[in-house]
Image (tube, rainbow, N blue to C red):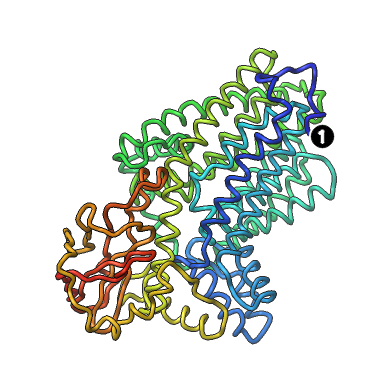
Amino acid sequence: MLSSAVSSARPTPLNGLRRLAPALIAVPILCYVILVLTYAVNVPWVDDMDAFLSFILGYNDAATLTEKIDWLLRPNNEHRILTAKLSTVLMQALTGEVNFRWLIFVAFAFLLGTFALFYRVFRSMNLPLLAFLPVCFIFWQPQYYLTSLWALTGLQHGVAIFLTLLAIYLLSGPGRYRFMGALAVQLLASLSMSNGLFGWVAGAVVLVLAQQWKRLGLWVGIGIGTIVFYFHDFQNAQGNDSSVAFFLQSPHIVVAAFFTFVGALLDFVPVTDIVKRSILPTLFGLVLVPTVLWFLWRMNWPLWSRNRLSDITQQRRRYFFTGSYAFLFINAFIVAFLRPRFGYGVMLVSNYMIYPALLTSLVYLNGLSELRPQQALNRWMRIGLALSAVVWVVSYGLHWPQIAQRRHMLLTFSYNQRHNDIGLGPNWGSDFATMVRRVMRDAVGRGMYRYPEGYFTPYEAALKPAALAQASVDPDLALRMRGGGYDYIVETDFDALPQPVTDAAVVVQSAQRTYLFPSESGFRPSAFFLRRPVKTIWAEVINPVLAPGIYKVGILTTPGSVQPIRFSNRQITIP
């Protein structure tokens, strides 16, 4: 049993819960698995179309092996995504189609791999299993749901993180085969996302500490060659040159952004303004960074003082922790340097939240490995358990409704893409919209992609413009509209809907097209958690998505409404 590894010489807090440790650890893992299974949908979003569907169409049409390799290695925006593309090729070969729900599951497997790596490091400490519980709470929380439930980000960040940390782990131990394995894994990490390139620096740090000079020379040589290859044909750097100008103009923002990004695990007030929102993460970052620096000094000073550690297992852990910190801190610096020009809120975007969760988990594990005497270790575990439990509960409270709303949004916009050739990201008339229209039509026509069913499926025939052409205005349906320009906010009167209402949408319909825009009312905390009746339908109508025309405005309410589709006397005109 896992609990058999308990060391009687090193008691831990909450000793009475030791027998429950496997069940306690299973709770956050199972909750997250259920979350992914429930909310992952087979709908591509924005860059997914180019990264997966456009790629597989071009790859299949390639006539030669050289052309196929080119499709695998060519960059997408700022990244090469070899692992994501290989996953797509394998899926299409096995099933005949590209399913984004299953691509999300593939990305989740890499996340599990990172967690397993942390667990392996923990087991080398010979501590009670209960001491690992804080890592489970920090790791398996939905703050970074856009990395877990978006195919492209999952197969970028999740892949690069796992492969890079695995390479560092392999380098932390002796043996020729471990080194060769680290080289192979690091090469794949580098070609799977630009963040993976940081692993060359982190691996070099480990080899310097281990004084493996011959291996260091080979590692650096291959790393330089890989980096040169990675950037040799980039045509789109997304304006990163302007980041230098931004830094020179506002260096204090970049410095603050670094600490905000590092401490983003404590992003507990995401709906407030960015100044108030960033205070707690920045303060936590100001705690984490000195803590890491202290651990780095404690772990590596003996190497330079010629007083090497006699515990080989702990020394390997020290190599792993040092290399992992190097990887994560380089990543944090690059994000803080390149991204604040897009707005400070980027430091707290869900796509990136996996990194502060990883860093905090590593710091906690590092403390388990280093802290003495026993009293300090016990205090460390109590702090870790309290903090991680709060993070887990707050993260589910804040982000679970957002995750459910995102699923509703993706399904709704897939209707628009299917029936209007637009909806999954681009604006009407843009070059991006033209590309997406071509790719989606081609993928569906070849049987490589199938649109999912949704709450609207029973009403699709009734939603066609021809079916709605003679629909009369419902005098009892009053809609409030405000806005213009980019969007309109459309809302029904309070308590004016037949009950029950679960999934709902605002309908805008012209003579040629019908669009749906998802209602957000059912995902407010009171309605979502307490299952209170939805009293209004509230939705944002995004005007740039609409083709020019005059649109009637109505609502779609499900399930079981006597009149599920109703129109008001309100109109929207798109010039």
Residue at figure coordinates x 48%, y 53% from the top left? 146
Q: Residues within 10 Å of mark 1 (few under 14, many from 20)?
A: few
Residue at figure coordinates x 36%, y 75% from the top left? 422
Left-right relation of 165 to 483: right
Residue at figure coordinates x 58%, y 59% from the top left? 155
Using the image, determine if residue 194 lies above or below residue 532. Answer: below
How far from the left and from the top, in percent, is residue 289? Answer: 51, 29
Residue 432 visible somewhere in the drawing: no
How many labels were placed on the picture? Answer: 1
Residue beneath disc 1 = 1
- Residue 370 occupies quadrant: top right
Element carrying mark 1: loop
- In the picture, the quarter occupied by the N terminus is top right
Residue at figure coordinates x 61%, y 49% from the top left? 161
> Which residue occupies the foreground of this view, 475 or 288?
475
Residue 456 visible somewhere in the drawing: yes
Using the image, determine if residue 437 lies above or below residue 102. Answer: below
Left-right relation of 360 to 491: right
How far from the left and from the top, in percent, is residue 190? Answer: 62, 56
